[in-house]
Image (cartoon, grey):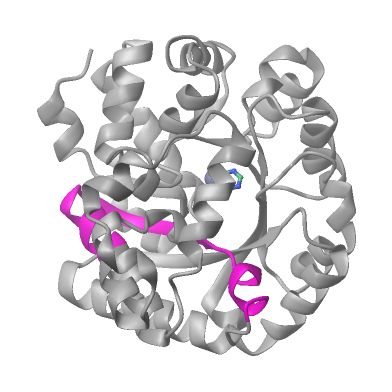
Amino acid sequence: PASDTFIEALPKAELHVHLEGTLEPGLKIILARRNGHPLQDMTEDDIRASYGFHDLPSFLALYYEGVELLHTEQDFYDLCHAYLKKAASQNVLYSEMFFDPQLHTRRGIAFETVISGLNRARKDAQRDFGIRSQLVMCFIREMSAQSAEETFTQAQPYLSDIVGVGLDSDEKGNPPAKFANVFKRARDAGLHVTMHCDIDQENTHEHIRQALEDLGSERLDHGLNILEKPDLLRQARERHIPFTVCPFPNMAIRPSSNEKDIRALLDAGLTITINSDDPGYMQGVYMTEAMKMARDGAHLTPDELLTISRNAFNAAWIGEEERQTYL
Ligand code: ADE
Ligand code: ZN
């Protein structure tokens, strides 16, 4: 297996991280003080001790509560800047970051406030830490298709700052097909497309099929249940669909996942990447720790981790010239 120092030194690209999920307890307290929220009286340890989830809905409840602390352009700046600083310290050279504008606009925060803070942080982080990043706008799947359409319309003035669109949050009863029209609009506008097919969700195989065959998803976020469907698996292999695998949440939801699934995905000839997902809520598991988890579970060799890392740079939504600077 690869050593810790090999993993720490490996140049990395992250393709599956939710900015709102990078909110650490320490920053929560700062934001609570800044915005007069009762959480300001808690300690970081109290906050951490209150975390615990065993499935997607119980995780989302925590995540939605945390999101409420974000109000101003500076709040969004601080969130994104802290994540990029941490990522850069782990030799992440490039990150594609999900954000969930609807969780903010539905609270009365302007789309512009959110994206301005994130963009200013991206620019400063590139200057200060050398890390490159782009934004992927996610639609909240339990909200209406109409709300997603309105969000895409609001995003029009900022499309040059958004490289792709994704689909996240509560999958139960919310198949990709619900959002066919807004994803078509996004593709027509030249945006890239990905979507979550979270682990062990209701109708997971049909959701994976829709994502790949009907919605034009170029990647699958999680997507592990493809292992149970040979025809979908063959399609993903032939199309070289990248899978953004996230060891920590997968293990939290399906405890055997780390050992079995990563090895099975590799054995099936799929293109996998390793990512953090929501590191602020996941016991400090950022990219380096996620790769160590994957190494420990699947006994990954240095060659395999190098391939996994190169998969991420190859799957990144960047120009070929930039790609060559990483490979
Ligand atoms: N929102 C934040 N993290 C998520 C995940 N892993 N799955 C679905 N929605 C999310
Ligand atoms: Zn995710």
Q: Position of residue 6 (x, y in %)?
A: 15, 29
Across and down, in percent, residue 260 comes to: 49, 9
Task: State the image coordinates of residue 70 (x, y, percent, origin top left).
Answer: 44, 74
Horizontal arrangement in the rendering, residue 180 relative to residue 305 (left or right): right
Q: Quadrant of the N terminus?
A: top left
Residue at image point 37% right, 29% down: 307
When the figure is inspected, residue 210 is found, relative to residue 1, above or below; the finding is below
Residue ID at (38%, 12%): 298
Q: Nearer the viewer, residue 31 or 311?
A: 31
Magenta-colored span: 82-107
Whether residue 91 is in magenta: the answer is yes
Depth check, front residue: 155 or 251: 251
Q: Is residue 114 left or right of residue 39?
A: right
Q: Is residue 260 visible?
A: yes
Residue 124 is a magenta residue: no
Viewer-side residue, 141 vs 124: 141
**x 37%, y 63%: residue:** 322
Q: Is residue 27 visible?
A: no
